[in-house]
Image: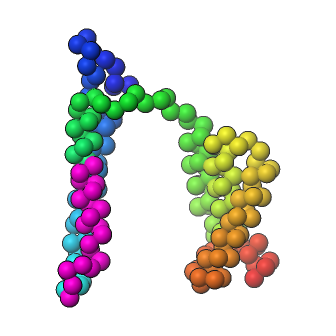
Amino acid sequence: MSEVPSSHGKRRPDRAALVIAPVLFILAAVIWWDAGRLAEMSNYSRIGPATVPHVVAIGLALLAIWTGFEAWRGDFPEREPIEIQPVVMIVAGLAGQMLLLKTAGFSIATGVLFALTAFGFGRRKLWISLPIGIALSFVVFIIFGRFLQLSLPAGPLEHLFF
C-alpha cells in the first residue's frame, strides 16, 4: 500500500485517496450541473427540486477537498487486504438477479442475490439462505407490488399466488 512510512517517519501520500478525491469532485460538479437544470423548471419559490441536490453537491465537494487534503498528508489508516471471494459472490448475486429478473421474477431473482450476498459475508449454508431470501423478497413484492401498486417483474412464484 502507499501508506508505508518513509525514512523521515512521515507517511507518504495515499495514492488511492488522491484518485478518489477528484472523482468525488467530478461527481459533485455533475450533480450541481444537473440540479441547475431542475432549477429552471420551478421559478415560483427559492426552495424547489434543486435545493437538496445542490446541498448534496456542496457536501461532496467538501468531502473531496477533505479527502484530498488527508490523502496528501497520508493520514488515512492503513487498509486491510481485500478478500476477493466475497466481492465475487456479491457481484455474482447482482449478475444473477439481473439475468433472472424477467424470467424467474422478482422474488426468486432477489432471493438469489440475498443468498449469494449472505454466502459472501460468511453464511455458507445456501440451502437455508436461498429460501429465506426468496421469502423475504416475496414479502417485499407483496408490499411494493400489491399495496403500493408498483410494477415489479412477476415470475412463476408471484403468478402462483396472484
Dominant SS type (magenta): helix
Task: State whether residue 156 is above or below residue 114.
Answer: below
| Colouring scheme applied when the structure was drawn | rainbow
State which quarter of the image contains the N terminus.
Answer: top left
In the orientation shown, which residue stands out farthest toward the top? Answer: 7
The image quadrant of residue 152 is bottom right
Percent x, y of residue 15: 30, 32
Q: Would residue 45 be found to the left or right of residue 104 on screen?
A: left
The residue positioned 70% from the left and 71% from the top of the image is 139
**Number of callouts in the render?**
0
Percent x, y of residue 129: 74, 52
Tell me which segment is drawn in magenta: 44-63
The residue positioned 75% from the left and 82% from the top of the image is 162
The residue positioned 66% from the left and 48% from the top of the image is 118
Q: Would residue 146 be found to the left or right of residue 44 on screen?
A: right
Residue 31 in sight: no
Task: State whether residue 32 is above or below residue 146.
Answer: above
Task: State whether residue 12 is above or below residue 69.
Answer: above
The front one of 39 and 73 is 73
The image quadrant of residue 32 is bottom left
Residue 77 in sight: yes
Percent x, y of residue 91: 56, 49
Task: State whether residue 22 is above or below residue 27.
Answer: above
Instruction: Tell me if residue 61 is in the magenta stretch.
Output: yes
The image quadrant of residue 31 is bottom left
Instruction: Tell me if residue 79 is in the magenta stretch.
Output: no
Percent x, y of residue 85: 60, 37
The residue positioned 80% from the left and 50% from the top of the image is 127
